[in-house]
C-alpha cells in the first residue's frame, strides 16, 4: 500500500523534471541576465539593475500596447469565426466529422513560416487578390494592405484559428443534446437556449481556446515581420531584434519578463471574471 502512494508522484516526475530543466532553469538565467549590465564582447555582470524594467516599459510601451491590442482583436476574431465552425462540425458533421477536423488541422502540415510567406504573395498590392480588384476598378490603385495592422491581424487569425476551433469542438461535442431539447420544451427560444445552455456549457472550450490563441499571439513576431512593417512591429519583434541582432541581452530579457507578467495578469483576471465554478462544471 505504501508503494502505491508514490505512483502518482512517479508519473509526474518526468514532466516535472522537463519543466525544471527547460522552463524554470532558463527563466532563472533570463532573470539574472535582465538584471545584468555589459556587452557581449566583454561579458555581462550581475549588477541588480532594477532600473531597466521601468526603462523598457517607458521606451516600448506603445509596442507592448499594440501587441496586446492585436492579441485581443485576433482572439475575438478567431472566436467569432471558430465557434460557428466548431458548432457545425460537432452538431451537424455526422459521418464527416473526422474529415472536417482533418481540414481544420491540415495547415499544420505546412511550416508556419511558409504559410505566412504564401499569404504575403497572395495579399501583395499587385497579387492575385488586390491586383485583380484594382484591375476591375473595385479598389483604387493606391490601395495598400501589406505592411498594415490589418495584414498582421489577418495572418494571426489565419495561423491560430485551429487553436480556437479544436478546444471549442471538444467542449461542444460533449454537450448533451437533451438539455437543449429540454430548454425548448420550457418555451425557450432558439437564441435563449443557445446562450443559456449551449454557450454556457461550452464555456470551458471558449476559455481554453482564448488562452491558446491570445498567449502565443501576443508574443508572435513572424506575422508582423512578414506581413507587417516597422510601423506595426510587435513586442516579439523587438525582443528578437535585441536578442539576435543588437545582442542587448539585458533589455531583451527584461522585455520578455514584462511580457510574461502582463500576459499572466491578464489571464488571471480573465479566468477569475469568467468564474472557475463555470469552468469546472463544464
Image (spheres, rainbow, N blue to C red):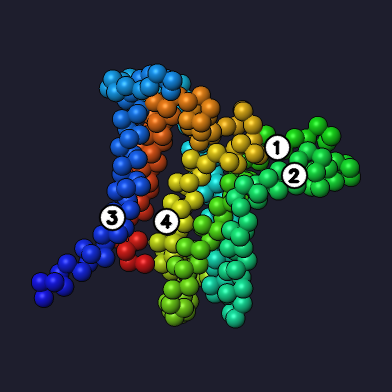
The residue nearer to you, when weighing 231 against 238, is 238
Q: Say which residue label 3 marks.
A: 16
Q: Say which residue label 4 marks.
A: 207
Label 2, residues with CA under 10 Å away: few <14, some 14-19, many ≥20: some
Query: Mark 1 or mark 3, which has the lower sequence index?
Result: 3
Q: Say which residue label 1 marks.
A: 146
Can residue 66 be spotted in the picture?
no
Q: CA distance from mark 1 to mark 3?
A: 43 Å
Where residue 233 sits, quadrant-wise, is top right
Query: Mark 2 or mark 4, which has the lower sequence index?
Result: 2
Q: CA distance from mark 1 to mark 2?
A: 10 Å
Q: Residue 111: x and y, percent?
A: 61, 52
Q: Residue at x 45, y 46 (%)?
A: 215
Q: Residue 224: x and y, percent?
A: 60, 37
Nearest to the eye among marks 1 and 3: give it: 3
Q: Residue at x 62, y 28 (%)?
A: 230
The residue nearer to you, when weighing 253 against 63, is 253
Q: Residue at x 28, y 20 (%)?
A: 47
Residue extending farthest to the left is 2
Side (left or right) of 277 relative to 67: left
Nearest to the eye among marks 2 and 3: give it: 3
Label 3, residues with CA under 10 Å away: few <14, some 14-19, many ≥20: few
Side (left or right) of 104 relative to 178: right
Look at the numbered disc 2 and give the secondary structure of its residue. helix
The residue nearer to you, when weighing 41 against 149, is 41
> Residue 23 got which mark?
none
Nearest to the eye among marks 1 and 4: give it: 1
Q: From the image, which quarter does the N terminus lie in?
A: bottom left
Q: Say which residue label 2 marks.
A: 121
Query: Mark 1 or mark 4, which has the lower sequence index?
Result: 1
Label 1, residues with CA under 10 Å away: few <14, some 14-19, many ≥20: some
Amino acid at each position: 500500500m505504501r508503494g502505491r502512494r508514490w505512483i502518482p508522484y512517479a508519473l509526474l516526475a518526468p514532466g516535472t523534471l522537463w519543466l525544471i530543466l527547460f522552463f524554470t532553469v532558463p527563466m532563472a538565467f533570463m532573470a539574472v541576465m535582465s538584471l545584468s549590465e555589459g556587452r557581449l564582447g566583454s561579458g555581462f555582470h550581475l549588477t541588480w539593475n532594477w532600473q531597466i524594467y521601468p526603462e523598457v516599459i517607458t521606451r516600448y510601451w506603445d509596442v507592448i500596447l499594440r501587441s496586446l491590442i492585436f492579441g485581443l482583436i485576433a482572439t475575438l476574431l478567431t472566436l467569432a469565426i471558430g465557434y460557428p465552425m466548431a458548432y457545425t462540425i460537432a452538431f451537424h458533421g455526422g459521418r464527416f466529422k473526422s474529415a472536417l477536423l482533418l481540414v481544420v488541422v491540415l495547415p499544420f502540415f505546412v511550416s508556419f513560416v511558409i504559410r505566412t510567406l504564401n499569404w504575403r504573395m497572395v495579399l501583395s498590392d499587385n497579387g492575385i487578390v488586390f491586383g485583380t480588384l484594382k484591375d476591375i476598378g473595385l479598389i483604387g490603385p493606391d490601395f495598400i494592405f501589406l505592411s498594415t495592422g490589418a495584414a498582421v491581424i489577418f495572418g494571426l487569425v489565419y495561423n491560430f484559428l485551429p487553436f480556437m476551433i479544436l478546444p471549442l469542438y471538444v467542449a461542444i461535442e460533449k454537450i448533451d443534446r437533451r438539455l437543449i431539447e429540454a430548454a425548448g420544451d420550457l418555451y425557450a427560444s432558439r437564441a435563449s437556449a443557445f446562450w443559456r445552455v449551449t454557450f454556457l456549457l461550452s464555456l470551458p472550450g471558449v476559455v481554453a481556446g482564448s488562452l491558446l490563441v491570445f498567449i502565443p499571439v501576443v508574443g508572435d513576431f513572424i506575422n508582423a515581420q512578414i506581413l507587417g512593417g516597422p510601423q506595426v512591429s510587435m513586442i516579439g519583434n523587438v525582443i528578437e531584434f535585441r536578442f539576435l541582432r543588437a545582442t542587448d541581452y539585458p533589455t531583451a530579457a527584461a522585455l520578455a519578463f514584462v511580457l510574461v507578467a502582463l500576459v499572466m495578469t491578464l489571464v488571471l483576471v480573465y479566468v477569475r471574471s469568467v468564474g472557475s465554478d463555470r469552468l469546472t462544471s463544464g
